[in-house]
Amino acid sequence: MAQAFQVGAERPEPPRRPAVRPWPRRRVTLLILFSGIVVVLGWAAFPVVRFALLKRRYEKAEGLERREALGQIIRLRSPLAIPLLLAEIRNPDSRDAYLDDLLDLIDQKDLELLLDRLGSDSTEDRSVAAFMIAALIERPWAGESEAVRASLPRIYGGLIDGLSGGAAAIDYVDGIRRVMQHIHDSDVATPILERLQAGESGSRVNALRAAYYLRREPALANHPEILPRVREALRSEDSRVVLGAMLVLEDQVQPEDRPLLIGASIHPEPRVREIACRSLGGLGGAGAAEALMRRLEDEDGRVRQASILALGRLKVERVIPALLEMMQAPAMMEVGQGEGIVQVPNPFPGEAAAAALAFFPTDPVVDALGRQAGAPGTHERIRLQAIRSLGTIARPRAIPYLRSQFGHDRWDFRLAAILALKGIGGREGAAALLKGLEAAVRSEAPRGEIEALGDALRTISGEKYGPYPGDDREEGEAGIRAWAKWLRSKRSTTR
């Protein structure tokens, strides 16, 4: 033990820790660079990852949750949302909601995507792609694109294929017109003719819809092959094709179409018979009245109404009692309300009958129209048309009925009566108008009513008496005295 505590004895050294070697500068640099790359890639990938998550939620959800997910996708402002929105605007109900968002997202580089979709096997894909190109056609990079010009037949074809009926058809018609407006030398007639000659009924129906909506456009109205192809469609066994052809021809019929129309008046489809009757009423000629008379007992009410109105246009007096009954009998029609269907008054048959009665200027017809004009329980459209028809017939016998309208609380009724009296003219018509002018000036009626009365008197008389717009009450009274003096002079010259 003494040796253990001996001075200068060696003590055991504690174990040494391994020395920490400093990182080389290169390694630190690489680490920082790698971390930066990871951060940048993560930041760049974040929208893509978020889009993928939202897309998954959108595809699984329904109703409001689905719309909310799509709204969040739109707010990402990512071009990845374009295919989703293209699918959404297939539905007309969601088209208005998402079309503006889709137009904001699409730029020039996306045009190729739309052009590629024009060659899709799906009719809906082709139609929507064509619709979007038409919506973008005002932008120079689309309207002036050679690729778009080269694809015009497919663009028009896609838009025509979209004319499948319903409210969406108008969108596609507007698209066709927009392309025609911005690319003036484009050929819309050829795609229509190609589909008119196709064997598939659906393509022919859509082509006929296009021909109907665009029939006033010079590109179709002046094309020599359109109407002959439409007439050929009348011989189709498909009722939809025949109906489409009838709609196109209705206001373009020629005398050579009369045999086709007479044949169509006995077609199994009621809508075809109805249009044939309307067209025969405008065309007339040999056999038209006889064909229409046979339809007076048609099983379909609209066909009967069309034949009655057509016979009225042809001035067949035998139809007067039927026209009077149609004008006076209340008609109803079914309309959707909520989830059900309700019946509401239908003024159109009575209004049309009142217009047709103007072709029969007899005292009993004048009296019937006058009574209908003043019947408070009758629909206002029928009453207004009865007033207009009295002006068309232009017989003094109608004056008492028209003068009673000056007390009506609605300006459109009073104006219709003024115009009808203007059409009747003569001293009797002028006297009735002067009474109305006196009441209007002294009751300080609206200036428009006073001006209409004064204008009617000036037209009948050729005189230039007032009142005029801006005249005060005193000047109005002076005008009334001048008109009264003129009337007295007319009375003395007629004795």
Image: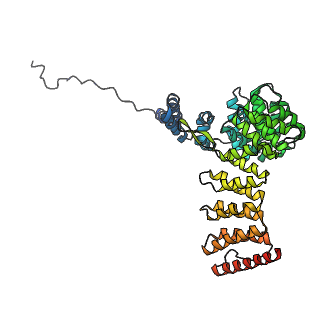
Residue 452 lies, with reference to residue 9, above or below; the image says below
Q: Quadrant of residue 219?
A: top right
- Pick the front one: 307 or 344: 307
Asked if residue 74 shows in the view, the reply is yes
- Pick the front one: 47 or 249: 249
In the image, farthest residue toward the top: 1
In the image, farthest residue toward the front: 495
Percent x, y of residue 308: 75, 41
The quadrant the N terminus occupies is top left
What residue is shown at x 67% (from left), y 69% (from top)?
436
The coloring applied to the image is: rainbow
What residue is shown at x 29% (from left), y 25% (from top)?
16
Percent x, y of residue 150: 80, 37
What residue is shown at x 85% (from left), y 38% (from top)?
288
What residue is shown at x 69% (from left), y 81% (from top)?
478
Percent x, y of residue 427: 77, 70
Residue 92 lies, with reference to residue 203, above or below; the image says below
Residue 253 lies, with reference to residue 386, above or below; the image says above
